[in-house]
Image: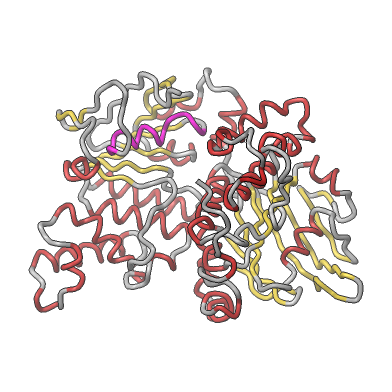
Amino acid sequence: MHALDGVDLSIEEGTIRGLIGPNGSGKTTFINLVSGLLPATSGQIYFQGSHILGLPAKDITKLGIARTFQMARVMERMTCLENVMAGRYCRTKTDLLGTYFRPPFTRSKQERDMRGRSHELLEFVGLASFADRPASDLVWVQRQLLQIARALAAEPKLLLLDEPTAGMGESESLAVQNIIQQVRDSGVTILLVSHDVKLVNRIADFVTVINFGEKIADGRRRTSRRIPQLSKPTWGLIMSDTSGAGTVLSVADLWVSYGHIQALRGVSIEVHEGEFVVLLGSNGAGKSTLLNAILGVQPAQRGRVEYLGRDITREKTERLVAAGISMVPEGRGILAGMTVMENLQLGAYHVRRNATAHINNVLERFPLLMERRGQNAGTLSGGQQQLLAIARALVSSPRLLLVDEPSIGLAPLVINQILETLAELKQNKQTILLSEQNARKALQYADRGYVLHLGTNAVEGTCAELSCDPDVQRAYLGGTEAGVEDETAEGRPEGGDAQ
């Protein structure tokens, strides 16, 4: 497989070059090559006249190239300040651990400057108030900002930004745009990889378009609007923008019971196009009942469910699936005696005419499942089975993806992998409604959340607001009684990880 095939690209000093293209086109691979994380089979890479292809990543960083990652990588057990200091270490002759643990009166001027500059960068990206908090407390958007600050701490001459606005709303994206422009104005050259073509068109000086690993267009940004070699569906995906997008799902005053037990009491929620919304609450709060009612599995007593503006309260489940709603059920619901491929074929029932193409698209997203497509699903690890359940739901190309308690029975590391998978789907404009007990983890990846308590709406807000809400912290983030600590039963291992 050729991830990149003969791509040539140059970046003029002090400019921003946008690098765009559909998923799998090779954009992140290109950044990985430049930053030294991947070897190239042929070709050359020059930075300020020096050949850097094959150099270790740490040496490339010292030369003046820093990067961010599409899936924000932060050191969760370290504070935000320590994360930024780690990025600055390549510019000092000081031992990083010594800098942190030595008492203030024994620190050298260089060490004090290192901490001072790190504080300045946190203020620059709007995270000054989080300096002494662990990075694990940050929600998705804040993690993206933290890794930008960490990259800037290395004093780069060339900054590689891989999807820096992924998962952000319009106002947040504009704030990051302002940061990028200020960095460029300070003299730093920038390579910007982004699905947000509007962002690229606003700030890039030049744009390169790649597809299937090949460069197909190159020039000033205005030329990126007409790319004949890209198919319309693919380019439409890149051009999609959820700012001001309509409502995909609206639930109003929904009541559901199981016999004499009232499970939902007037619950109301909304999910907008391209959003990642999480339902939080302890066992019995009504999260799974709500998802089942949306999909027509559990009938509602009263209230209204609308999907794309149409009342679906009394619709049959099979018609809703055909209309674009897919669900990853609690417990995964895979057919253990069938192969991975056969499970995916069942997910393609409503797209039978193009089943092979839909399945191949999903397998490209999940290479592990591609490798194991002939393996019985029951022999996969718990994390791999959860990936299969998500993949099966995606085969029908749903407009709305419902995911019910995906972390149950999985180790903490695997939970991270599953939630990162959902975050990647959100980056590609997939609308997601997630039911999850592990509030601490879910709030790091989603956009907004609703807290249910005994079948009623308790609290709602952005994930940043919920993370700071004292009641939410006390009930769902601070103790095992709510069942959401990272090391509770939700996070116990079951047969390895998802990779």
Residue at x-position 63% and y-position 45%: 379
Which residue sits at x=85%, y=74%? 262
**Image check: 470 left or right of 175?**
right
One can see residue 247 in this view = no
- Compared across the picture, whether 183 is left or right of 419 comes to left
Query: Which one is nearer the viewer's eye here, 158 or 287?
Result: 287
Coloring basis for residues: secondary structure
Which quadrant is the N terminus positioned in?
Answer: top left
> What is the number of callouts on the image?
0
Q: Is residue 430 magenta?
A: no
Residue situated in front as seen by the camera: 348 or 237: 348
| Occupied quadrant, residue 300 | bottom right
Q: Nearer the viewer, residue 313 or 440?
A: 440
Q: Is residue 91 above or below residue 77?
A: above
Query: Picture coordinates of residue 61 (x, y %)?
Result: 21, 44
Q: Which residue is drawn at the image coordinates 28% and 48% (left, top)? A: 183
Q: Is residue 357 visible?
A: yes
The relative height of residue 305 versus residue 453 in the rendered view (above or below) is: above
Residue 86 sits in quarter: bottom left
> To which quarter of the image does residue 84 belong?
bottom left
Q: Position of residue 419 (x, y in %)?
A: 54, 54
Which range is magenta?
A: 23-36
Q: Is residue 31 magenta?
A: yes
Q: Position of residue 285 (x, y in %)?
A: 72, 73
- In the rendering, at what x and y percent does residue 108 appear? 8, 69
